[in-house]
Amino acid sequence: MIVKRYVVKDMPEALTKIRQDLGHNAVILSSKKIKQRGFLGIFSVSQLEVVAAVNDTEKADSVKPVVPAVSKQTVVTRTTQSTDSVPASSMETRRDAVTASDGQSVSGAGLDVLKEVKELRKVLAKFLQQNTDLLPDFIQRIRLDLIDNDVSPEIVEALILRAIQENNEINLMEEQEFRHILTNLIEKEINNSFPASSLAPTAHIVAFVGPTGVGKTTTIAKIAAVEMLKNKRTVGFITTDTFRIAAVEQLKIYANILQVPVEVVFSSDELEQAIETLKDRDLILIDTAGRNYGSSALVSELNRFLQASQPDETCLVLSLTTKSSDLERIVANFDGVPIDKFIFTKLDETNSYGAMYNLLHRYQKPLAYLTHGQNVPDDIETATSERIARLVVGEKQYG
Ligand code: GDP
């Protein structure tokens, strides 16, 4: 039995080819309309796929259409098998088999074709980067949405191009499906390169740094409550934020409510002493002064405190209500401070979450928590890659 697959404009063209190739005894096993991938898998043409077969011993007068219901899988398998048994009457049939099986189990000429296609896609991807108006409308919409969401344009374009390169028949997709692909790409990147992680269960001393007013003290109180209630850990507070009386008072109020001991320290020597005092606590959370860390003197002071306390983890707390460019500058100012994880606050006060992804992507550091309100301890969640990805691609859940 010889089975062949034809991709043609219409049925008369198919019949002519089948007669030529397989003779008049051939039967049509299936026919269906298909969309052929076009330029970068985007612009498609409608065509007809016809699968025909003939017994190698048979030769008769007419083509008999029978059994139209053959699944795509069967069609591909039969056609692929047939390329061995049939002396290739046309290269076109072989090429079709290669693309139909989408790169699986191909060899020789097939591999060359795939390599060429890959190279071509790369060139075209570059071209598209400079001509985003060539993208289908729904991809252009998603692109603008992401940029609106404060994801940096370079990251958006790299993401979209990757999605196009890694997926076939983009043009046949729904907008939602493409968003889903982007979400998955981001999720995978986070999992592979900077997996989200809350405080390690073994962390004994954790320091929190960041500008004034971002919600450091409130976040520390939330984390303390979660660790005490959920993980049954004993907690102690230390504040080095003696610059503002209100900051000390605020931590003392939380300490009072949570029944947690609190130490107020004015120098790095006192910090060592405070840690000694609280050493029996499972977890010591250190609130540092929020300042303008543009000044190198302040960064040195912070580093002295960090050196004296030797934290197992240092979290940089940032508010998402801060303008994206200011966030970039603030993080750059923390360059000399050994940061382990990010925490983003005030998600309830914004609809733009892209800036957090820009920072995670650029610094390749994990995100520990997201906070979304003033309530202690409720308005905090442990970050997950899925959550971050969804927020970046457009899920609006707060505010
Ligand atoms: P710190 O100076 O960084 O220690 O910031 P604070 O903890 O004193 O918080 C400053 C203000 O931000 C307070 O009014 C907090 O209630 C508020 N705040 C903290 N976290 C959040 C949050 O996730 N969402 C909102 N809307 N407000 C928050």
Image (cartoon, helix red, strand yellow):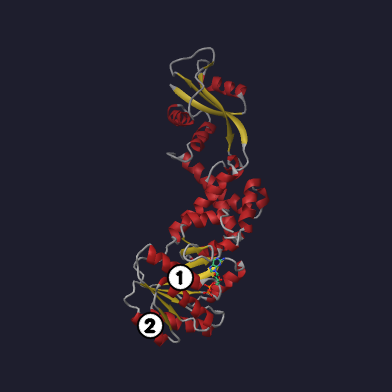
Residue 136 visible within the image:
no
Q: Measuring 59% from the left and 56% from the top, which residue is drawn there?
A: 156
Task: State the residue lying farthest toward the top.
Answer: 61
Mark pair 2, 1: CA separation: 18 Å
Residue 94 appears at what percent x and percent y?
A: 50, 33
Q: Measuring 58% from the left and 54% from the top, which residue is drawn there?
A: 396
Mark 2: few, some, or many residues within 10 Å (few <14, many ≥20)? many
Residue 43 visible within the image:
yes
Q: Give the side of residue 288 with respect to residue 121, left or right.
A: left
Residue 128 appears at what percent x and percent y?
A: 63, 51
| Label 1 secondary element | helix
Query: Quarter holding the N terminus?
Result: top left
Q: Give the side of residue 220 with respect to residue 15, left or right.
A: left
Q: Give the side of residue 210 with respect to residue 234, left or right.
A: right
Residue 335 appears at what percent x and percent y?
A: 51, 75
Q: Nearer the viewer, residue 290 or 229?
A: 229
Q: Quadrant of ligand 1?
A: bottom right
Q: Is the residue marked 2 within 8 Å of ligand 1, measured from its CB? A: no
Residue placed under numbered mark 1 in the picture: 221
Q: Measuring 56% from the left and 62% from the top, which residue is drawn there?
A: 347
Q: Give the side of residue 390 with respect to residue 282, left or right.
A: right
Q: Measuring 53% from the left and 30% from the top, which residue is drawn there?
A: 90
Q: Is the residue marked 1 within 8 Å of ligand 1, measured from its CB? A: yes
Q: Nearer the viewer, residue 108 or 160?
A: 160
Of the residues under marks 2 and 1, which one precedes in the sequence? 1
Residue placed under numbered mark 2 in the picture: 274
Q: Amino acid at mark 1?
A: Ala
Residue 129 vs 301, above or below: the answer is above
Residue 102 appears at what percent x and percent y?
A: 49, 39
